Image (spheres, rainbow, N blue to C red):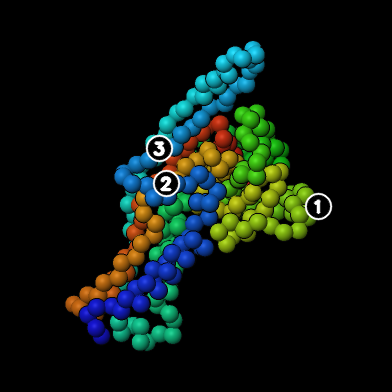
Amino acid sequence: MSVSIDQVFVKQFEADVHLAYQQMGTKLRSTVRSKSGVVGQSTTFQSIGRGTASTKSRHGIVPVMNLNHQPVECVLQDYYAGDWVDALDELKTNVDERRVVASAGAYALGRKTDELIISAMDNASAYVGDFTTGLTKDLILEAVEKINEKDVPDDGRRFAVVGVHQWNELLGINEFVSAEYVGDSNPFINGFEARKWLGITWVLHNDLPLASSTNRSCFIYHASSVGHACGQEVKTDITWHGERAAHFISNSMSQGAVLIDQDGIVRIKCKDNA
C-alpha cells in the first residue's frame, strides 16, 4: 500500500464525516442561537433587555429606549475523536470501514456538541416541579406559564427537550398525539422526528441531566436564550503509519455553548421511571 493516502479518498471521507455530523450527529445545535466562524478562544453574545415606547411632542426628539445590553462570553474548547483503520482489516470485511469510522467520529462530536448545549441549559434558575412526579400536562402548562410571564416571544422558535421516559409520558397525553392538536405532519430536527404542540417543538434526547438515578431535568426554552459558538467545524485528518500498517483518522472541532438569557428557559424537574 502506498505511504500516502489518495486525496480523493481524503476528500470523500471528510464529506462523509461532515454530512453525518449535520444529519445525525447533533440534535440541538439548530434549536439554539448559533454563531460560526469564530476567531479566537471566545466570542460574545449580546443579551438585550426590553425596550419601552413613549410619545413625543410635535418636532420633538424621538425618545430613546435605552436598551440594556449585557454581553455574555462564550469560551470555545477543542475536541477530538480518532480511530485506527488497519490496512489488512479493510480487505477482510464487506463493511465500508471508511463510512463506519466517519459516522462514529461524527456521532462522537455531535454528542459533544449537544453535551455543551445541555450543560449551558443546566445553569437555568427558573424551574417547575420537584422530582416527585413524572412529566404531566399540569407540569408542562406551569412551565409554559412561566415562559409567558417573561414575555418570551411565541414566534415558532420555542423548543422543549425531554428524556426517553418523559417522551413516553408525553405519548400518553391525548393532545400531544392527536392530529387535531399537533397536525398530520411532524417537524424534523437534523433528521430526528419531533412534534409541535402548544407552539413548542418537542425533541427527544437521552443525555439530559440525571441526578440520584431518578431526578431528570428537562427544559423548555426559546432559541435565543442559549448560544452555541463554533470556531472550527468538524475537520478530518488522515495519515498513514507504516509501523502500524494502518491509517489514523482524526476528527476535530472547536466549539462552546453558554446560557444567554435566564428569562428564556425553564427547567422541568421530573421523576424518571416514575
Q: Which residue is mark 2?
A: 229
Report, in whole angstroms, how far the alpha carbon at label 2 lies from the one at label 3.
9 Å
For the question of whether residue 86 can be seen, the reply is no
Q: Amino acid at mark 3?
A: Thr
Height in image: 116 above or below 92? above
Residue at image position (40%, 77%) is 97
Mark 3 and mark 1 in contact? Answer it, CB < 8 Å: no
Mark 1 and mark 2 in contact? Answer it, CB < 8 Å: no
Position of residue 180 in the picture relative to residue 235 (left or right): right
Residue at image position (76%, 58%) is 184
Q: Amino acid at mark 1?
A: Glu
For marks 2 and 3 on the same chain, the one whose residue lies earlier in the sequence:
3
Question: In the image shown, does 80 or 231 lie closer to the viewer?
Answer: 231
Query: Residue 237: where, in percent of width, then height?
Result: 31, 67
Query: Residue 58: where, in percent of width, then height?
Result: 65, 14
Q: Which residue is mark 3?
A: 44
Q: Find numbered disc 1 in the image and state the secondary structure of the residue it sits on.
A: helix
Residue at image position (44%, 46%) is 35
Q: Quadrant of the N terminus?
A: bottom left
Q: Find numbered disc 2 in the image and state the secondary structure of the residue it sits on.
A: strand
* Res 74 → quadrant: top left
The nearer-to-camera label among 3 and 1 is: 3
Q: Find numbered disc 3 in the image and state the secondary structure of the residue it sits on.
A: strand
Q: Which residue is mark 1?
A: 180
Query: Residue 34: where, in percent of width, then height?
Result: 48, 47
Position of residue 161 in the picture relative to residue 86 (left or right): right
For marks 3 and 1 on the same chain, the one whose residue lies earlier in the sequence:
3
